[in-house]
Image: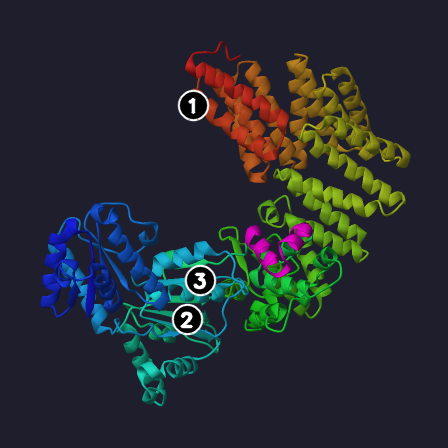
Amino acid sequence: MKVFLSHSTLDRAFAERLAEDLKAEMFEPWLCELSIDAATNWVSEINRGLRDADVVLLLWSPHAASSPATELEWTSALAREIADKRLRLGLVLLADYKLPELLRTRQYIDGRKDHDTAINEIIQWLKERRSAGRVGRTRAPVYLPDSRPEEFVGRRPYLEKLRSTLINEPGMCLLSGEPGSGKSTIALMFALEAQRDFDAVVFQTCGQRNLDTIIGELADKLKKEVGEEVVKASPSEKLQAIKTWLKEREALLILDDVWLEAGALTAGEFISILPGTPVSILYTSRRMGLPKVHADDVLHVDAFNPEEAEEVFKKYLGTATTERHREALLEFANRVERLPIAITVGTELLSNQFGPLSEAARGFALANLKNDIQNVPGLLQRAIETQSEPARRLLEAASVCAPDGFWLPLAIEIAGVNKTAGAEARDNLVHASLMRMLDQERQRFQLHSLIRDRGRTAAASLADLQTKHAQALERLFKDWETRWKECRECLQEIIPASEFLWSSDEPSRTSWLMYWGHSCAKRIGELDVALRILQAEESFWRLRDDRKANDQLQHIYGNQALTLRAWGRLDEAFALLKKQEEICLELGNKDSLQISYGNQAIILKAWGRLEEAMALHKKEEELCLELGNKDSLQISYGNQAIILQDWGRLDEAMALHKKKEELCLELGNKDSLQISYGNQAIIFQDWGRLDEAMALLNKKEEICLELGNKESLAYCYCNWGLLAREQGDQITEKQKLNAALEIFTELKVPRERDAVKKELEKTEAKATGHGGSSN
């Protein structure tokens, strides 16, 4: 084995010592000081030495870095390495000095501190190469599929991670991802780029096939290496011969499309294939994990990013066409969630259409994503068909749930499977990358849009699934006040389920479901969702012009106004309440009219128009007494009391709060009860009875946490912080005010948020000694 020692003459001492030790181990070192006679042409001799060498060893140091001759030698060896597709250049560090960019990621032998150890490592490395037959004049054996990823774009981070994991030292890595995400393409591209770094590269597709079939195909592929007789041997003998051959060299084994389901490999059979070191193994699989593969060695292959999607468009359609129709093309990419196979197939199909391109891209039917080579719907359908019946039923049930994510127990109920079978089906679907896990603790999952489309297509009756979806939500949300935590997970389901009920001529069921959904969303602080539900319901009822529709609309306007009021949009809220009042007067609906009066009064109070506000509350009270509506009456008493507090009439205010409390206890209305406790606490604080105020705030907090009422909880913490300030407890003051600020910010209520910020500024000023009185 001939070894060319590329070095600076200033590092001659180490080079000559290394050459002597190499000779002792039966290597043929080539060293310019020893191998070139004084009278010969040095350039031609160096050229001959490089040409005949099996390996070039670069002895790197500051001297070598500044030597033009050394640079020519190692760059020549690197060029030959690339051409031969096998390792030709070894690297030894003699001193600290920045490596050239081309050598930065290369494995090296460290000779900076201990030359003896470095020489031993060099000799051992060369011996391993010699014993593995890695110094022949032919290229390394490479067995890759005939197809090449000609349209490969981007994905460089995956390739770099594979390079760092598998090349520098033997390792294992799993490329995991959804069907069509490009796992096999990335693996093949890596093999093409990295084959020069290995003594052998073998690409073997596994698929849903048994061990004997896979090993038989692999033995036939490697018969030139392991011998013709192995092809005729038993499966166990074939496997042993293949593993032995692989272990004799630094090889890369790619096991593509690994399945561990029925009809494919078992976990034990999968482990039996693994040859062990020094072989690096790259797997691709839809599974999120495989036996013997550590979590840190799993790379999840995501969809194309927007730049990669555009690159595909430009390859097939040209830059000018892509720029001209960019918006429509990106809309198509987003519809398929930038799934690589879908974008590639779809763009190729678009390139063969000659109608308006933007129109074709926007109107592209996902079911038509297939060409002569790839069939995207077929690929997904085959993946689904391999699943068990409970898993298929769960996937079909999930396909009628919200596309942005669904709560697993809801899908299990729709599917009609028990909890145990549902959990097993969930695990199988996630392992097969047919279902995405969004939040493990909350059991929230999602389907890719194309898989969702296949699930809906495969269902025996989509309408039957949608009916079960709506029924499951009705059973859940009718008890929203006690099951609000579960309802929180399903708020996004309300609008699509209501749309189905409305289209099924079920207006009453539609209104109840939307009322429950809106009420729950408002209670727990999901105001955006609450408003969207109301706006969707409004769009339904505006299609009709009758008494029932108008009555529903006035309810909707009133509830929309509450959300807008919370966001500080008082003018818009007041206008909606006036529309509600007008409809109520027209219909003679006194109950809704008193609600409108009460909510208008709250806005008038916020504007400082207290006399007008109190007048409306009195009209509200009068109607409540006439109708015998105790629940609305307690609300009116509470709001009148707050105005009395503003006027300084605290005894009268407390009397009304006590009347409110009495009614709430009688009615079992905990939500209004906590409001009463909070307002009574403020009066006790004004009276200097701080312990009584604190006791009421504790009761208020307990109820808010039980009911999930974030807005009232924020008010509780704000008042608690101010009470702590008066008690001189600066730690609690700051803690509670910050808690209130966090919730008000989350709820997007600017008036309350800004008010708490001002109180926190006072807190900070007092703490630093720059503020005046905090009262």
| Residue 26 in view of the camera | yes
Q: Which residue is mark 2?
A: 255
* Residue 310 is covered by the magenta coloring: yes
Rendered position, 404 above or below 392: above
Mark 3 → mark 2, Cα distance in angstroms: 10 Å
* Residue 355 is covered by the magenta coloring: no
x and y, in percent, of residue 80 in the image: 33, 64
Amino acid under disc 2: Leu
Q: Which residue is mark 1?
A: 731
Tag 1 or tag 2, which sits nearer the N-term? Answer: 2
Amino acid under disc 3: Leu
Left or right for 570, reference 551:
left
Amino acid under disc 1: Ile
Q: Which residue is mark 3?
A: 175
Left or right for 488, reference 26:
right
Left or right for 135, reference 222:
left
Q: Which label was assigned to residue 141?
A: none
